[in-house]
Image (tube, helix red, strand yellow):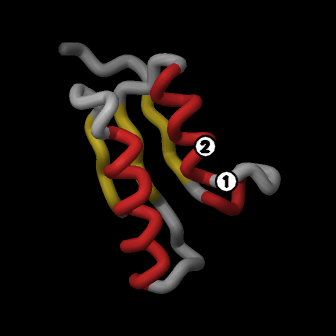
């Protein structure tokens, strides 16, 4: 599978919309790779968010998930 769309997910850029919803909508719309990038969050917050996104991506098994 050739990847075409790449999302860098950062809650600071969602204009108040939950990051999980943004990721779900993006992947449903064709995003192939999701990178979680939360520079201003603690490790615990990043971990919690990553678990939520991982759960969402169970419905999209071919999507690549990166945590930065």
Against 35, residue 57 (above or below) is above
Label 2 close to label 1 by CB (< 8 Å): yes
Q: Residue at x 23, y 30 (%)?
A: 61
Q: Quadrant of residue 26?
A: top right
Q: Residue furthest top?
A: 1
Position of residue 50 in the picture relative to residue 45 (left or right): left
Q: Position of residue 4 (x, y in %)?
A: 38, 18
Location of the C terminus by quadrant is bottom left
The residue at which mark 1 appears reads as 18
Identified at 53% across, 41% down, the residue is 23
Q: Residue at x 49, y 85 (%)?
A: 42
Disc 2 to disc 1, C-alpha distance? 5 Å
- Is residue 17 positioned above or below 57 on the image? below
Q: Residues within 10 Å of mark 1 (few under 14, many from 20)?
A: few
Q: Which mark is residue 21?
A: 2
Whether residue 27 sits left or right of residue 2 in the image: it is: right
Question: Tag 2's secondary structure?
Answer: helix
User: Quarter of the image holding residue 3?
Assistant: top left
Q: Nearer the viewer, residue 19 or 13?
A: 19
Whole-percent x and y of residue 10?
A: 58, 57
Q: Is residue 52 left or right of residue 25?
A: left
Q: Residue at x 64, y 59 (%)?
A: 11
User: Which secondary structure, mark 1?
Assistant: loop
User: Which corner quadrant of the image does residue 62 belong to?
Assistant: top left
Judged from this view, the residue extending furthest toward the right is 15
The crowding category of the residue bearing disc 2, from other C-alpha atoms within 10 Å (few below 14, some 14 to 19, many at least 20), is few
Q: Residue furthest left?
A: 1
């Amino acid at each position: 599978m050739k990847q075409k769309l790449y999302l860098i997910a950062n809650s600071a850029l969602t204009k108040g919309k939950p990051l999980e919803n943004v990721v779900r909508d993006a992947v449903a719309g064709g995003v192939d790779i999701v990178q979680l990038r939360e520079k201003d969050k603690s490790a615990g917050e990043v971990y919690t968010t990553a678990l939520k996104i991982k759960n969402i991506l169970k419905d999209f098994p071919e999507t690549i998930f990166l945590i930065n």
